[in-house]
């Protein structure tokens, strides 16, 4: 059975991946944005990545989940 926090973490990662695909797909429009909107977009990505990192910390502490070892990267 999958824990709700792990499911939320997976969904968060999925949305971040979708955002990166949208960023690549709409790159020409993003380059034309004014500096304020670019700053806001950058800050939103920063918040999303930070919250995802905090989610990693909670999963590591609670369940011993470390994706680096899970995928055999270490």
Image: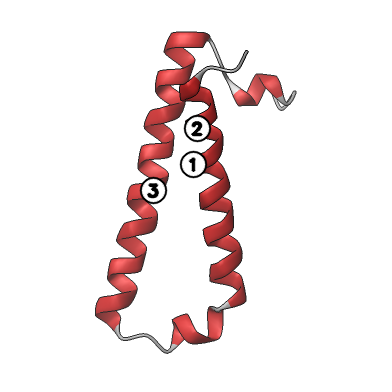
Asked which colour scheme the image uses, the reply is secondary structure
**Residue 39 on image: x %, y %:** 29, 70
Which residue reaches farthest right?
72
The residue tagged 3 is: 48
Secondary structure state at the residue bearing disc 1: helix
Which residue reaches farthest left?
36
Looking at the image, residue 30 sits to the left or right of residue 35; the answer is right
Looking at the image, residue 56 sits to the left or right of residue 22; the answer is left
Disc 2 crowd rating (10 Å Cα; few below 14, some 14-19, many 20+) is some
Mark nearer the viewer, 1 or 3: 1
Looking at the image, residue 36 sits to the left or right of residue 1; the answer is left
**Residue 32 on image: x %, y %:** 42, 89
Which residue shows up at 75% across the image and 23% down it? 72
Residues tagged 3 and 2 counted as in contact (Cβ below 8 A):
no
Residues tagged 1 and 3 counted as in contact (Cβ below 8 A):
yes
Quarter of the image with the C terminus is top right
Look at the picture and state if 39 lies above or below 57. Answer: below
The label number, if any, that marks residue 9 in the structure image? 2
Quarter of the image with the N terminus is top right
Residues tagged 1 and 2 counted as in contact (Cβ below 8 A):
yes
**Residue 71 on image: x %, y %:** 72, 26
The residue tagged 1 is: 12
Which residue reaches farthest bottom?
32
Q: Which of disc 2 and disc 3 is earlier in sequence?
A: 2
**Of 19 and 50, which appears nearest the observer?**
19
Q: Which of disc 3 and disc 1 is earlier in sequence?
A: 1
Mark nearer the viewer, 3 or 2: 2
**Residue 64 on image: x %, y %:** 53, 10
Label 3 to label 2: alpha-carbon separation: 11 Å
**Quadrant in which residue 43 is drawn:** bottom left
Secondary structure state at the residue bearing disc 3: helix
């Amino acid at each position: 059975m999958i824990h709700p926090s792990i499911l939320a973490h997976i969904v968060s990662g999925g949305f971040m991946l979708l955002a990166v695909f949208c960023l690549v797909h709409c790159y020409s429009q993003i380059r034309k944005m004014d500096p304020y909107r670019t700053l806001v977009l950058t800050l939103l990505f920063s918040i999303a990545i930070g919250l995802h990192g905090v989610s990693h910390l909670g999963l590591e502490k609670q369940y011993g989940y470390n994706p680096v070892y899970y995928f055999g990267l270490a």
